[in-house]
Image (cartoon, rainbow, N blue to C red):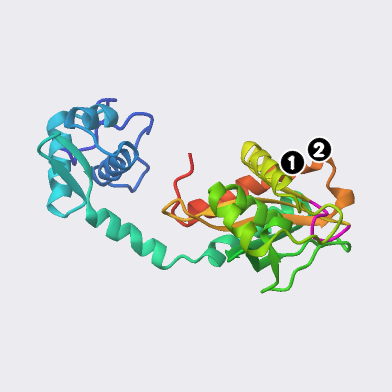
Amino acid sequence: MNDETPIRRSRGRPRNSGASEPGTVQALERGLLLLMRLSESGRSSLTEVSEALDIPSATAYRMLTTLQKHGFVEFDEASQGWSVGVEAFRTGASFLRRTTLIDVAQPVLRALVDTTGETANLAVPHGGEVVFVGQRETPNPIRAFFHPGTRTPMHASGTGKAILAEMARDDVERLISRQGLVGFTENTLTNPATLFADLEATRTRGYSFDREERFIGMSCVGAVIRDATGTVVAGVSVSGPQGRFSERAVEGFGKAVSDAAARVSEGLGAVIA
């Protein structure tokens, strides 16, 4: 029996994958699973690949050498380990070249409005501010609205504080030194110690909370978006009247916004733990 013959017993099928779907090519499916295994492990021995995919070592070796021939995997003589090759990166990079933040975010923003009932926003950092580049409005007649291109200081914004929370403390301190902490309402965090305490709370819970810190009567919950390198490139948030942002509501908004940020990040190629 060769590798192309359908195998009716459990041996030869990747663990937990079940039978191949009708119309799929089993050898190709195994090869893709092999690449996924290497991308997760970083480097694996032949034995580890064989055991992970539940296939004979000889089969795993033929698959690896075939992929090596085309540059999709590499072999390190010193460690006797296999890893993803440069051609796999080049192929994957074509996805990133055709994928933009706004394209990926639009359906996620729509879903976020449906989930929370509040306006969903997309913003990118620029200097010490965030710039709003996308928005999906809630049908609720009382709602938040930002024109595309609207700017606001990071310390007085839900998305801004989410981004600040992921920055090194020294960088945040330099930003504060350069532009200060302007007060917009009585709730704006204008004291560095108070701001840093809020940023620590943001990191702990995974989302920020702007409680009427830019405009009286309006609140916002935000989370960060990362690209394929893990770099924070944007933030997503929901905003609306403070009366709809009770403690219980904020917890639900926080989960929804965090999930939305993770989906956009994954769409940009980020690996979410």
The dominant secondary structure in magenta is: loop
Q: Could you tell me residue 265's position as x and y percent?
A: 51, 53
Report, in whole angstroms, how far the alpha carbon at label 2 lies from the one at label 1: 7 Å
Q: Is residue 62 left or right of residue 251?
A: left
Q: Where, by quadrant of the figure, is residue 151 drawn? A: bottom right
Q: Secondary structure at mark 2?
A: helix
Q: Could you tell me residue 48's position as x and y percent?
A: 23, 28
Asked whether the residues under the numbered discs 2 and 1 touch, taking CB atoms below 8 Å apart as contact, a structural biologist would say: yes
Q: Where, by quadrant of the figure, is residue 156 drawn? A: bottom right
**Which is nearer the eye, 190 or 93?**
190
Q: Secondary structure at mark 1?
A: helix
Asked if residue 100 can be seen in this view, the reply is yes
Q: Residue furthest front?
A: 177
The question of residue 104 being in magenta is answered with no
**For mark 1, what is the residue?**
252
- Give the magenta-colored segment's residue range: 211-216
**Which is nearer the eye, 197 or 62?**
197
Please name the amino acid that badge 1 sits on.
Answer: Gly
Which residue is found at the position 54% from the left and 66% from the top?
103
Question: Counting other residues with Cα less than 10 Å from the Cα at mark 2, is it few (<14), some (14-19), or many (20 or more)?
Answer: few
**For mark 2, what is the residue?**
248
Which residue is found at the position 28% from the left and 60% from the top?
90
Asked if residue 1 can be seen in this view, the reply is no
Q: Could you tell me residue 146's position as x and y percent?
A: 75, 69
**Which is nearer the eye, 253 or 19?**
253
The question of residue 213 being in magenta is answered with yes
Which residue is found at the position 28% from the left and 32% from the top?
53
